[in-house]
Amino acid sequence: MNKMIITSVSILVLMFFASCTTMKAVPNERAVSRFIGLYNTGDTDRMIRMSSIPMLIDGEIVARTSDAAFFWTRLREAGFNFQDSENSYTVEPVSRNSYILFGDTMEVRTFFDKYVPETAVIVRLEGPGGGYILLLSGRKGLYPFIFGFTGPMS
Amino acid sequence: MKKIIIALLGLTLAVSGFTQNADLVYVDGWVDIRTGGESFEAFPGDTLKPGDSVITQTDSYAELEQNNLSSIIVKPDSIFTIREIETDNGRETVLSTTVGSVSFRFGKLFGREPMVATPSMTAGIRGTELTVYAGEDGSTLIAVNSGLVTVKSQGESVDLVENEGVEVISGEAPGEKFSLLGREMDFSSWNEERYGELLADPVTGIERLGRQLDSFSGDITELAMAMKQNAELEDTLKAKQEKLKAAGEEAKAQTFYKENIEPLVLIEAPMYLNIRYHTLSALSFRRYIMGKLYLEMKSFYIMDADNPMYRDFLAAYSRIMGKFEIDIVPYMNPRDL
């Protein structure tokens, strides 16, 4: 009986943490891997929910959810996927100069200062035509939020 | 320069403080209010002041009222902003639709009505009920249900009365006006057609949008030059005033200030307000019109990034953004983003 209660409480606690939403949590390797997997499954609705608005796409600040939705939908329609195998990506903490990866402009600099949490990570991965960068932070359920997308890098 | 100073002085001395806030009276679905660089979920009872925007989603809309006399309906997938500008009539409220569709019904408010604007035109209105459609290509369609509307773009104007409409293509003068009678206004189809034309030749399209951005930066540069000259003149005159003070002529120095320096000080705030007006208009245009086109092109060519047309588009886009960084960004501040 006791074992059953402990198991139930543990499940409830796990469910509680899984449903928590925070923008300020460092995504670990597993969370990054889950996010890449999520994108590659083509679950656009969830990608939209995991997009932190405003978000960066290259040097463009996307300020409307409908524009982010449009972008993810179009990428899926184009058949764009990331390479998703072991060691196919690297994760590093965001630094003072990370903004340059997206664009050396006042808007991008301000975006990083204003909207990107210190807990964010830069994920470098491969996709069609070259390398791509994702800017991830926080967590909602199993997945981190996406704050930025850029590539292919020249 | 002198002409600008006199004109601005005239409007400074005119009735000022003609600020029109708007109260949110109804919200259907998720609507954002953007204020001071932050976004919040909108609720009935919220008040919008100059600088604030209402952003609706594809499945939401909002209704605003001004002093229970004027009604503004922000339809789905639209961005509506209250701005202020100094004109020959003093400080005026500008109800700006960057993209999407907004309907206005104006009552008699203080005997004067606000201006209505989109990226491609401004409109003066009198006793009016109208709908403004701001397309994703920067063009505008206006339909007047009652009253009189004067639509201005590129230095030309057209007067519209009840049941008349006009289209203003981005960067062009107003087109021929048309009758609304027996004509169903369908914003979606019109927007689709306009946006389709933009996408048919995206390089020419981005160049055209770049010219629209140039017209904002032209206004900003002209005002900034006038403001700089004003400041230089003020410094020169202050030096003269100091000389009078040093010579012990205190009364003369005071009169000199009243007659020569004070008028220059008074026009600084209106000049700055107008620079901010054009800067924020340019930023909205760049963010929601040009930014959308960029997303469209990037997502379409993401599997074909070496496509010559895409490369040409990116080259034109980079050049325009470089100009934006030089001509407009210096007048922005982090709260604008």
Image: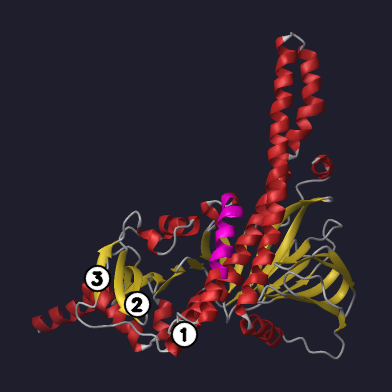
Badge 2: chain ID: A
Which residue carries the number 2 mark? A130
Which residue carries the number 3 mark? A90
Q: Magenta region: which residues? A: B316-330
- Circle 2 — which element? strand
Q: Is residue B319 magenta?
A: yes
Q: Label 3 amino acid?
A: Thr
Do marks 3 and 1 share a subunit?
yes
Viewer-side label of 3, 2: 2
Coloring basis for residues = secondary structure
Q: Quick one: quadrant of the N terminus of chain B?
A: top right
The image shows a total of numbered marks equal to 3
Instruction: Identify the residue shown where x is 39% and y is 59%.
Output: A99
Which residue carries the number 1 mark? A73
Q: Which comes before the other along the chain, label 3 or label 1? A: 1
Q: Label 2 amino acid?
A: Gly
Q: Which comes before the other along the chain, label 3 or label 2? A: 3
